[in-house]
Image (spheres, rainbow, N blue to C red):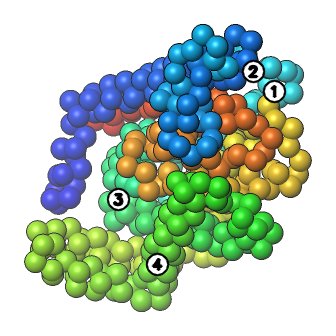
Amino acid sequence: MSRNEDIIKRSFQSWRITVAILLGLVIAVFMVYSSLSKVYFIENPRHGTHEWIDFNQNGKVDPSIAEEFIPSAHGTYKQQQLGDILTEISWTTQSFFWIFLSLCFMVGRDAAYMMRIRTLTNNELNWLQSFHVIMIWEFASALSPGVVGGTAVAMFILNKEKIELGRSTAIIIVTAMMDNLFFILTVPVIFLFIDTSVLFPVEEVRTSSIKYLFWLAYSIKLIISLLLVTSIFIYPKLIQKLLLAIFKLPFLKKWKNIAEKTGAEIVLTSAIMKKEKFGFWFRTALSTCLSWISRYLVINCIIAAFVDINLMQHLIILGKQFMLWIIMMVSPTPGGSGVAEFAFGKLMLGLGASSLLLSGLAVIWRLISYFPYLFIGAIILPRWLKRKS
């Protein structure tokens, strides 16, 4: 057994898995509770209990900042929890239709992921195995900071499903490459049809910083994509040489062995993937596009359930989600929690909905797209590990 395999196996000892599952459930329950119990201040001139004082001196009412409001017998704002606001939303037949459609797109997203993992393993995994791989992968990603993800867990899962470690590594590298390429190639197309002033909120300093964060992250993704494509298809030893050069630095020397292993794995990935035919890459690219588009359309459906939006606004929402997801990818919190909800509200302003309603829709979005994986993973993972052991 190699040192890396031994580390992976020790990382998945029963007590560690138990802690991860309990952590996931605690995070899910806590985040749902904290989201629904969050206090907002809504304008109510007739029965107001608080007065706005512009605490942060920006001249704008922010209903989510408690310091902005003080108790007053003649106030024009009333304190209310987000959970109460959600119950007061008008749930029509149209609302239920769009919410159902958002759930269908979530299923479609995972089906596309399953199709991709089957393609990358040359159908060695059946649909049930693919389902387990994707659900546990999503569970690990939900527990990991957005900047980390669940790739190490995915390698372990694939290896447990009888995919040798070298090929498992190759599969994970290719999924990362395809995801990055989808993002890198789609952004220029979006900017051809939608002006950047529409995509980025610029009315506040803290929201305009999203624009700079986006371009920084986009540049990093572009560099990574170019390196991966070059290393897999043109010059396999490029990243290997770069890693070895970087990890010769004195303060990085202790991770030199890991860098050597990673470089060797990328060279191995190149050897494996160069043998694949056009059909393999077409199916992989198609499933990647379907998975991301399905992921994005979930938000479109949730907003359409409560806000009247036209086709152009649907396209703008799709464009803005590229900004939203890049922010989540660099988030230090598990699953982008907190950061995602904030960015959702800021990026989706201007659609004819109040910031308060958008906060409520952000919670619905996370209830549909994030929390279910914590519960599903907590159910599937112990049984899967018991069967594989």
Residue 213 visible to an observer of this rendering: yes
Kindly identify which residue carries mark 3. Answer: 164
Image marks 2 and 1: residues in contact by CB distance under 8 Å? yes
Q: Which of the two marks, 1 or 3, is nearer to us in this view?
A: 1
Image marks 1 and 4: residues in contact by CB distance under 8 Å? no
**Type of residue at label 2?**
Ile
| Distance of label 4 from label 2 (alpha carbons) | 44 Å
Q: In the image, is 271 to the left or to the right of 80?
A: left
Q: In the image, is 65 to the left or to the right of 314?
A: left
Kindly identify which residue carries mark 2. Answer: 89
Q: Does 139 appear above or below 2? A: above
Residue 224 horizontal/vertical position (percent): 45, 74
Residue at the image position 85 percent from the left and 43 percent from the top: 309
Kindly identify which residue carries mark 4. Answer: 223
Q: Secondary structure at mark 2?
A: loop
Residue 303 horizontal/vertical position (percent): 75, 38
Kindly identify which residue carries mark 1. Answer: 95
Q: Does 184 appear above or below 54? A: below
Q: In the image, is 51 to the left or to the right of 169?
A: right
The N terminus, quarter of image:
bottom left
